[in-house]
């Protein structure tokens, strides 16, 4: 599938910024199941200072906010070719060891509610893949999907206590429970091509578990599916805080207003052109 993305993030400041830095993790990388064909990022109100891959291999840009600017606007546009790997992204790579994905974080630390949920799952733990599917269903049953009911600082335990949340909360509870079974788990942030609309209010988040013999396998608890060709992976980390698309500080900014515009669409014309070109090559090869 050929997907096109336009993602604009606007930060409007109430006061004059005297100093500010932002860390942007907004550029996907070519990896298992996806190929980045083109990607551009435009920044207004800030200037690039450095680019690097962090310890989770997320492509990261560090930008400094221009003093006195009333707003910072970051716009990303790109095209990514994807295939359906049944959620499997494969072998572990990078500098972060697998044991790092077993450690609890502030957002994923298990308490009595996570432990109780895990104990309630009636499935064979020896069948890791099957048990995780059952766990995913249990998490979705316990937490109603309700946009606006939680925020970026809501923990797994708090989401379970409230009984409502969003994709981030589903992923954190799933990750928290999986780590209790000594399964390396990580959070993934990216984009999802929705079936019913192009315009969206935010990106998407899901979880990945490391299963021997398969490697990293994705679980989208909110949609009860393993990620397919509709998904674009952008970031990963031990939790959302490590995979957040934009983090930073702005001194003197006062209250900050955030506006996001996101569209994810299937590029049918480009896909047809590629298929036609591919078909022509096959005919030449067969002739």
Image (spheres, rainbow, N blue to C red):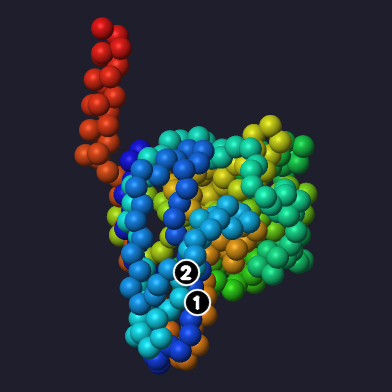
- The reply to whether residue 150 is visible in this rendering is no
Label 2 with label 1: CB-CB less than 8 Å: yes
- The reply to whether residue 111 is visible in this rendering is yes
Q: Residue at x 24, y 33 (%)?
A: 272
Q: Residue at x 49, y 61 (%)?
A: 51
Question: In this rendering, is residue 234 above or below 84?
Answer: below
Q: What residue does disc 2 label?
A: 49
Quarter of the image where one finds residue 46: bottom left
**Place of residue 96 in the rendered image (x, y in percent of width and height, measured from the top left):** 69, 52
Q: What residue does disc 1 label?
A: 21
Element assignment for label 1:
strand
Q: Could you tell me which quadrant the N terminus lies in?
A: top left
**Place of residue 87 in the rendered image (x, y in percent of width and height, measured from the top left):** 53, 40
Furthest residue to the top? Answer: 287
Q: Earlier in the sequence, mark 2 or mark 1?
A: 1
Q: CA distance from mark 2 to mark 1?
A: 9 Å
Quarter of the image where one finds residue 8: bottom left
Closer to us: 142 or 77 = 77
């Amino acid at each position: 599938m050929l997907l096109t993305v336009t993602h604009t993030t606007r930060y409007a400041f109430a006061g004059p910024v005297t100093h500010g830095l932002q860390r942007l993790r907004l550029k996907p990388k070519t990896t298992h199941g996806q190929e980045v064909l083109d990607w551009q990022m435009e920044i207004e109100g800030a200037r690039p200072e450095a680019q690097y891959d962090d310890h989770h291999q997320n492509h990261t840009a560090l930008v400094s906010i221009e003093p006195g600017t009333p707003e910072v606007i970051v716009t990303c546009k790109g095209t990514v070719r994807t295939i359906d790997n049944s959620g499997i992204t494969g072998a572990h790579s990078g500098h972060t060891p697998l044991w790092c994905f077993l450690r609890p974080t502030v957002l994923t630390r298990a308490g009595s509610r996570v432990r109780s949920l895990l104990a309630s799952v009636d499935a064979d733990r020896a069948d890791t893949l099957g048990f995780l599917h059952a766990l995913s269903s249990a998490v979705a049953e316990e937490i109603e999907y309700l946009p606006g009911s939680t925020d970026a600082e809501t923990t797994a335990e708090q989401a379970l206590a409230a009984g409502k949340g969003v994709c981030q909360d589903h992923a954190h509870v799933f990750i928290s429970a999986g780590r209790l079974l000594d399964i390396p788990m990580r959070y993934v942030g990216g984009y999802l091509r929705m079936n019913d609309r192009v315009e969206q209010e935010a990106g998407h988040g899901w979880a990945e578990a490391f299963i021997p013999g398969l490697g990293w396998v994705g679980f989208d608890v909110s949609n009860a599916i393993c990620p397919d060709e509709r998904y674009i992976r952008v970031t990963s980390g031990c939790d959302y805080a490590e995979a957040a698309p934009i983090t930073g500080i702005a001194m003197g900014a006062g209250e900050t207003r955030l506006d996001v515009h996101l569209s994810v669409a299937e590029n049918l014309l480009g896909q047809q052109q590629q298929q036609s070109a591919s078909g022509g090559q096959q005919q030449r090869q067969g002739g």
